[in-house]
Amino acid sequence: MIEYLIDTNIFIALLKGNAKLKSFVETLACAIDTIVYVELIQGAKNKAEVRKIEKYLTRFELIHFNKIISQRAIKLIRSYSKSHGLMLGDAIIAATCLENNLTLITYNAKDFRFINGLKILMP
């Protein structure tokens, strides 16, 4: 059963070769969401890097956003975009975690810590 969702910044560290982080993450039941997937592909330098990223991502369940996640993301944006600077991508990541009862693994807890009910793990 999936318990964790991995944020983009964690994957960047993994893809740069952080062996300790890789060992930690690969022992957990983790997923990614559509936003993280797209952010990683968008940040790739070339098509070869896209292939490398996509090959690695096949290890993780991919959670697509749906109507329920979209509605939760809208509520989060209403609540936190002006007061805390919550961005769309982070709102969808948080909404995915909240709707699926997942803990977010991230290095950027400051981007999410104000969201009530969101569980965060910083490795």
Image: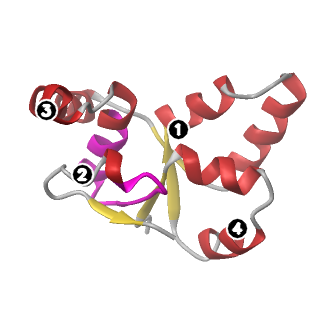
Q: Which of the two labelled residues, at mark 4 and mark 3, occupies the earlier sequence position? A: 4
Secondary structure of the residue carrying tag 1 is helix
Q: Which of the two labelled residues, at mark 3 and mark 1, occupies the earlier sequence position? A: 1
Q: Which of the two labelled residues, at mark 2 and mark 4, occupies the earlier sequence position? A: 4
106 relative to 77 in the view: left or right? right
Q: Which residue is mark 1?
A: 36
Asked where in the image residue 88 lies, by quadrant, the reply is top left
Secondary structure of the residue carrying tag 3 is helix
Amino acid identity at mark 4: Lys
Q: Which of the two labelled residues, at mark 1 and mark 4, occupies the earlier sequence position? A: 4
Q: Which of the two labelled residues, at mark 2 and mark 1, occupies the earlier sequence position? A: 1
Q: CA distance from mark 3 to mark 1?
A: 24 Å
User: Residue 113 versus residue 1: which sits nearer the camera?
Assistant: 113
Q: Which residue is mark 4?
A: 22
Badge 4 vs badge 3, beta-carbon distance below 8 Å? no
Amino acid identity at mark 2: Leu
Q: Which residue is mark 3?
A: 83
* Residue sitting at x 57%, y 30%: 39
Q: Nearer the viewer, mark 2 or mark 4?
A: 4
